[in-house]
Amino acid sequence: MSLEIHDISKAFGGFRALDGVRLTIETGSLFGIIGPNGAGKSTLFSVVSGFARADEGQIRLDGQSLDSLSPPARARAGMVRTFQVPREFRHLTVRENLMAAAPKQTGESLLGLFFRPGRVREEEGAIAERVNETIRFLKLSAVADQPSGKLSGGQKKLLELGRALMVEPRLILLDEPFAGVNPVLIGEIMERITELNTRGIGFVIIEHDLEALTRLVPQLAVMDRGKVLAQGAPQAVLDDALVREAYLGGVS
Amino acid sequence: MEAYFIAIGIIALIYVILSLGLTLQYGLTGLINFGHVGFFAIGAYTSALLALKGVPLVLSFAAAAALAGLAAWPLGLVSLRLRDDYFAIVTLGFSEVVRIVITSEGWLTNGVQGLPGIPRLYEGLGGSAAQLAVLVTVLAVTLVGTWIIRRIAGSPFGRLIEAIRDNEEAVQALGKDPARFKIQVLVVGAALAGIAGAFYAHYITYIVPDQFIPLVTFYVWMAIIMGGVGRVSGAIVGTAILMLFLEGSRFLRDIVPGVSEVDMASVRIGAVGLLLVLFIMYRPQGLMGDYTKR
Amino acid sequence: MFYAQLLVNGLVQGLVIGLAALSITLVFGIARFPNAATGDFMTFGAYSALSAHKVTGSIAMGGLAAIIATGVISLLAYLAVFRRLAERSVVALLVASIGIAFFIRAVLGVAFGHSQQVFQVPLSRPYVFGSVRITPLDLQLALVALAALALVFAILYLTPIGRQMRAVADNRDLARVSGIRPDRVMIALWLLAGSVAGIAGMMLGIKTIVTPEFGWEMLLPAFTAGILGGIGSPVGAVVAGLILGVVQEVSTPFVGFTYKIALAFIIMLAVLLVRPRGLFGRLEGAR
Ligand SMILES: Nc1ncnc2c1ncn2[C@@H]1O[C@H](COP(=O)(O)OP(=O)(O)O)[C@@H](O)[C@H]1O
Ligand SMILES: [Mg+2]
């Protein structure tokens, strides 16, 4: 059971943002991706999640080819991504943002809404419960009923994470989830990610903060200039000469 | 005098139904529908033609709603792949094409001569009783329409269309297809316009293609912009102002000597243009305020 | 040959559409919205030319009047309205352009009345080439259009302000950081867009009958040509205008006169679905 990224290339104009990326990530694992700015990490997420079309290569999730699926279909197949720059629904409150993320709602079809009002009400109750849990977990209670557009950058990142969790996918792609988040909370969220992972949810995490990431994930890949330089256990990868060259700017 | 107010009331409510549709489409979802009059026309002609063939009005009204809604479907499929501004152009073009078809297909629509003698609602009642009955019926439909829009706005569906307006890609990332929601919104808004068209045809009893020009679309835009985009109350207040404006301009023509109907039409168009520009520039939130603070 | 004749007619019509599309594509590419007032700018140009022609008896003076007056109106629309909406959403600009369109139409309706007006141009014997007849008037119109196009392209490609306009169309942010002053570019843009629409309006007025509504009816074909040519591409707009003009004429025997505009609509949909960047557009699509 894995996410297979097979020789993906993607160019913007003449610039190759991804250059033959090949990675296999166990679906239930914790996997990290690091690399300098502009390495192509976010672009890789966009291609994997279907928001950008790859020029070459294939993507499979647990054996199923994703190449012809739209972004929503890929999410429904069990893989949800977050965005590096938060994309909160800014006119909706935090609570509403999370409610909107819950999957398969009867009240999201007009037929269901008008012909099965009882069921809609029931579902709303159940979703509200889960949302409350998520809000508590992400420590967003104080702002739960504020328009999400007014949140701080860190809070918005938490909301991104919360929405992805609400979908209950098998695999979550997190793009720099800790950027701007209060360090105390980072620790707690990492604990919770580990806990969710033991329950079978996989995470692929792009992170800038090397140290934080090495504490969290047993496996990671290093990207630079559209290529995967190395892959494996954090320490082994960081000892790799190429990686030192690229990521640490050659300081030894 | 009473008859006059009933007449105004009926027309005003027809415009309210139109603005409810646009409130759902633009106000709540952000779809820039510049072709509302096309669906209005489809409703008017559908119901009129069927009624003239002897179909009971209940059925012809239902057909008007269904056909107008159906017309929105392919347009939605096509257009939802487009950026906002292209969507606006496409819908504007659509309504013009509807008018061209109505004008050209004389065998069906009687072309520019139009359709006279469209049966009234409640013809059996006769006179002012029938008028009153029509008013009550339009009012009932308006209230149901208002209830539907409110219900949608406050539902999981409404939550999602607001989310779509805020960030479409984030909605996709959560596994939901914005197009599915937008098409439903388009269809419902168009069906409402179709019903409005049916009421219009059976009230006026005589329709010609020239009644379905883009100006009508922008009357409705003017109403929802003046009232406050995205608020049902805004649609209603805006329509009230629109009616004051339309009736006022007619009244003005009657008392100012030497002003011809075509001149007055020009003045009306000019005033609509000016109001649209002024409201967009100086009071984009309308008179009833921004919907986000509701 | 019957079709050769339609081809010739279509080319003249196509030049009108091409000029209108040029105006649209310049604004769409640089100011970033579809200007729905373009059709009524054309009407304004036609009435300006008509008035000047009546006074002076000269078509050339009519053309000059159309260029200057419509350029000025267009610039005024920018200064009074569009500039102040520059930071707002596209719907604000769109609705405002509709409002301006209505306002111009109303002013023209009150000022000139609603009766149909025609340019009193002398009839003259057509040149006959085989079975194709070309009137001297059509020839003159084509020359006027070509001259106008040559001038516009000279401005766009040979002058500093033209280069700046194209730079802004290509990449607004890049243009800004490279020190291009957006204000000057925008003023030049609106003057140019208005003048081009004005000339198109005069040509259409000479070919047909002028009413306060007649420019508005060109809006859809003009948008279609702009999209077919690729938004932001001046060459594309003109080429697409010619194609559309010819297609409309040649198809008239099949689809009938009234469905010309419907045909433009179908073509627009097809382009948007199959190749949203049009013939000559850059990568940025309709989505
Ligand atoms: N839509 C785009 N158009 C053009 N270039 C892009 C686009 N998206 C990303 N890039 C470029 O691709 C490279 C990789 O970007 P990104 O994937 O965001 O890097 P990372 O997330 O590793 O910092 C960068 O040089 C960026 O400028
Ligand atoms: Mg990134």
Image: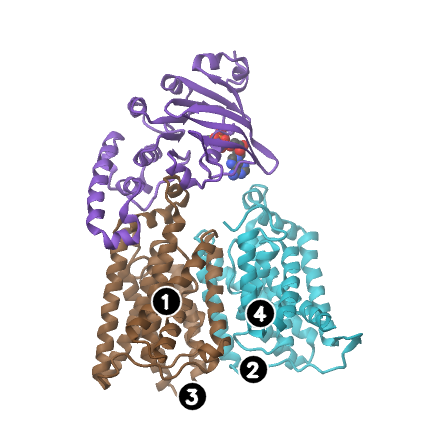
Chain colours: A purple, B brown, C cyan
Vertically, is A204 above or below B184?
A: above
In whole angstroms, how far apart are the C-alphas of marks 1 and 3?
29 Å
Disc 3 target residue: B258
Numbered label tally: 4
Vertically, is C210 above or below A139?
A: below
> What is the chain identity of the residue bearing mark 2?
C
Disc 4 target residue: C260
Residue plotted at (52% across, 51% down): C286
Where does the image place residue C189, in percent across and percent down from the top left? Answer: 59, 57
Task: Give, as a three-letter code, the residue at label 2.
Answer: Gln
Q: Marks 3 and 2: which is nearer the front? A: 2
Where does the image place residue C39, in percent across and percent down from the top left? Answer: 54, 67
Task: Give, as a three-letter code, the residue at label 3.
Answer: Gly
Residue plotted at (43% across, 85% down): B260
Task: Give, as a three-letter code, the residue at label 4.
Answer: Lys
Quarter of the image for residue A153 reads: top left
Q: Residues within 10 Å of mark 4 (few under 14, many from 20)?
A: many
> What is the chain identity of the residue bearing mark 3?
B
Task: Give, as a three-letter code, the residue at label 1.
Answer: Val
Disc 2 target residue: C116
Where does the image place residue B290, in percent across and percent down from the top left? Answer: 31, 55
In whole angstroms, how far apart are the C-alphas of marks 1 and 4?
28 Å
Disc 1 target residue: B220
